[in-house]
Amino acid sequence: MNRVLAHTGARYPIVQAPMGWIARTQLASAVSRAGGLGIIETSSGETANCQREITAMSALGLPFGVNLPIRFLKDDAMLRFVCESGVKFVTTSAGSPAKFIRPLKDAGIVVYHAVPTVDTALKCVDAGIDGLVVEGAEGGGFKNPEEVSTLVLLQAIRARMDVPLIAAGGICDGRGMAAAFALGAEAIQMGTRFVSCSESPVHANYKNAIVDAGETGTWVLNKKSSPCIRALKSQRTQAIHEAGLMPADTFANLKSVYFDGDMEAAPALAGQTVGLIDSIKTAQEIIEETVSEFFAITARLGALAAARSFG
Amino acid sequence: MNRVLAHTGARYPIVQAPMGWIARTQLASAVSRAGGLGIIETSSGETANCQREITAMSALGLPFGVNLPIRFLKDDAMLRFVCESGVKFVTTSAGSPAKFIRPLKDAGIVVYHAVPTVDTALKCVDAGIDGLVVEGAEGGGFKNPEEVSTLVLLQAIRARMDVPLIAAGGICDGRGMAAAFALGAEAIQMGTRFVSCSESPVHANYKNAIVDAGETGTWVLNKKSSPCIRALKSQRTQAIHEAGLMPADTFANLKSVYFDGDMEAAPALAGQTVGLIDSIKTAQEIIEETVSEFFAITARLGALAAARSFG
């Protein structure tokens, strides 16, 4: 039995990442309707709006989850709301989940924490986490400056613990999903892929920038300070790259990137999968193609094993 | 038919990386005897020594290859020697293979070039290369500062061309091999794993440092200059990391790291797989365990496909 499916109630072990402002009902419901697991974000810090989104998503009767980025929450309001709202699945991120686990578990919620290293994974398991989102350096958005890749991180964590793992970073289709399962994951999470999908609320310029970028189209910025991020190359991020450090007001106009399509207003967060994404598809197309490619590849690999052959 | 096996004559599609000074007959013959493909290095620049090694390796009658790091070759002596020596398989790296391809092909040699990006891969195919070593950012030694991971790079290159691909970077066993094959590779190359193996000529301190390091135990240095490298964390590499740039004489005492075990004499080149390697094994143990784990994982994935199930 796939434990992530048992924990989430989704039909397919394909999770949508919790991008601030973007991961709301419009996108999450499209993902969940197609059989994946939509996640509602709270990292925007817009408490009232996010609470409305959780209520709206709940009303649809689809499996879904909520992300709580611990370090970015101003107070306990969102935590309390989630505990009382009937939400069944939460991913925590950006900080230690130790304080959050007890109230969430007491509310009957399954909790996965997003981890960038083995050490944080070990601490999460000690704290009683149900599973982990294993976030490799390829992913977009806030990153750990150690930059351990999905390939290495998944193996290193799987070798040390048996909790269910959702692989994130560098995955946007059935090829990456098959590789993740080979390494011991039971599910995948995709961010950049869903930012660029038809039902994503972002401006067409952002979606097209993702489609147009190659595999060297992003970089990791602000590695010696916080937050360390992965974003699309642009004039603005070139300046941050050259300076090495990121001005404090860098994200003041992030919503202008997302919703007005001004790609120089702030760093446009995106993962290395921009080099693999070459068209805008619906959530349903993405999920169905991922599942079908996953089974085609696992069948091909199974035939190698059956023949004890390498090709 | 596995094209890398057809091109190399090896029993298993497992290639040993061409580490300067380290990848000589002692190590390469152990790898080739165990069914993998040993490679003789020439990046040390020790032309006479490397020619002797190629002659010694040839005399054993085992499949093997030679690496020619184009940018580091002082003159055509090594190229001419390789063309006349009966070598059947060459990997080129560090520079454009365009000038090298014709003489090598005229000598009946199969040529693979090591590439860190899609653009270089496309140029290689135009130049008539037989296959590619796809080098993700996880690998040790000389790196491309774009740091595209093996997971993303393999997919991006496979999507654009059909030549045989050897996956390198972040792979040290059958888990990584199965993931690489899921992504379209037909072989894997391992460097750090073989640096740390019993038959490797390096000092025990170097092997133990690889075994002891975790998945965050390396970093990429000198990204804004050349050469950009991945090496173990140490006091010396910490200083380079903080300065951002690497002094010109950094590698003057590299052989003291390798053969005297003075781990602060120079950056000790190593990949992120240091976080996955936890013991020193013989080349034969490494290769047999890799093959057996590869088939165990591909059989497990094949069973998922047969059941159309995720676990």
Image (spheres, coloured by chain):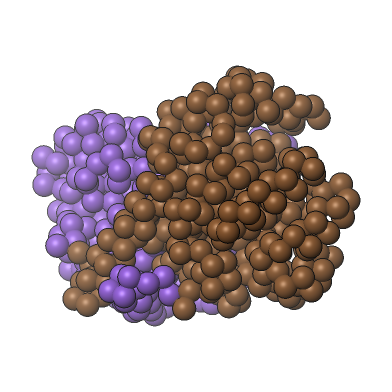
Chain colours: A purple, B brown
Residue B244 visible at all: yes
Q: Is residue A89 above or below residue B297?
A: above
How many numbered circles are shown?
0
Question: Against A273, is A78 above or below?
Answer: above
Pick whichever, A225 or B246, lies toward us. B246
Q: Which of B8 and A100 is in front in this view?
A: B8
Q: Where is residue B209 in the image (x, y as percent from the top left)?
A: 49, 27
Seen in the image, is A91 located left or right of residue B146?
Answer: left
Quadrant occupied by the C terminus of chain A = bottom left
Tell me: A305 left or right of A60. Answer: right
- One can see residue B213 in this view: no
Q: In which quarter of the image is the N terminus of chain A?
A: bottom left
Q: Who's the residue at 54% across and 49% down the image?
A: B29
Determine which quarter of the picture holds residue B211.
Answer: top left
Q: Nearer the viewer, residue B217 or A139?
A: B217
User: At 23% across and 70% down in the image, what residue appears?
Assistant: B304
Most extreme residue toward the front, as rendered?
B59
Provide residue B22's location: percent of width, then percent of height. Answer: 62, 39
Eyeballing the image, is B108 above or below B90?
A: below
- Name the residue at 36% across, 32% down: A119
Q: In which quarter of the image is residue B165?
A: bottom right
Image location (x, y in percent) of residue A129: 21, 40
Which residue is depicted at the point 49% across and 30% down?
A: B207
Up/down of A34 relative to A170, above or below: below
Percent position of residue B63, x then y:
56, 61
